[in-house]
Image (spheres, rainbow, N blue to C red):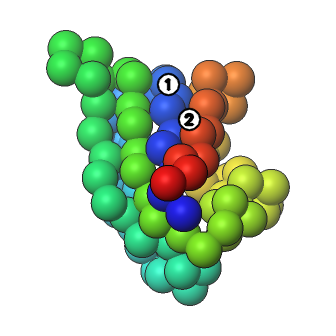
Amino acid sequence: MKVISKFKVTKGYGVWKKEFESNEAMRLKNHVRVLAYGHENGNESSVYTVFEMNSIKDKQLKDPRMIEFRKNAGVDPTSLEIIALIE
């Protein structure tokens, strides 16, 4: 399953990217593969990620470690949109 996430960051793209890249071990442990990530052209606070995973549960949305990660990375939780793609 491929999943697209869109959200706003409040601490800047550089802070988010550093936190995101440091979280690779947790993604691998949960069988989540990063296909792409980045921000809108001209708008570094609007971030997109694209993942491949077995199920949406692998995204660990309610896992306390992921909540803390998103907080440290400056993700605005009210802006988070997740779209699961169906082929």
Picture coordinates of residue 76 (x, y %)? Answer: 61, 27
Q: Visible in this render: residue 54? A: yes
Picture coordinates of residue 51 (x, y %)? Answer: 45, 59
Contact, mark 1 vs mark 2 (Cβ under 8 Å) = yes
Mark pair 1, 2: CA separation: 6 Å
Q: Nearer the viewer, residue 63 or 3?
A: 3
> In this figure, which residue is indicated by the disc labeled 2?
75
Picture coordinates of residue 10 (x, y %)? Answer: 49, 24
> In this figure, which residue is indicated by the disc labeled 1?
8
Q: Please, what is the three-letter code of the amino acid marked with disc 2?
A: Val
What residue occupies the far top of the structure in this picture?
42
At x 27%, y 23%, the residue is 40
What residue occupies the far front of the structure in this picture?
87
User: Of helix, strand and loop, which one carries label 2?
Assistant: loop
At x 52%, y 29%, the residue is 7
Vertical position of residue 20 compared to residue 80: above or below: below
Q: How many marks?
A: 2
Q: Please, what is the three-letter code of the amino acid marked with disc 1?
A: Lys
Q: Nearer the viewer, residue 8 or 54?
A: 54
What residue occupies the far bottom of the structure in this picture?
29
Taking 52 as reference, is 71 left or right? Answer: right
Taking 75 as reference, is 40 left or right? Answer: left
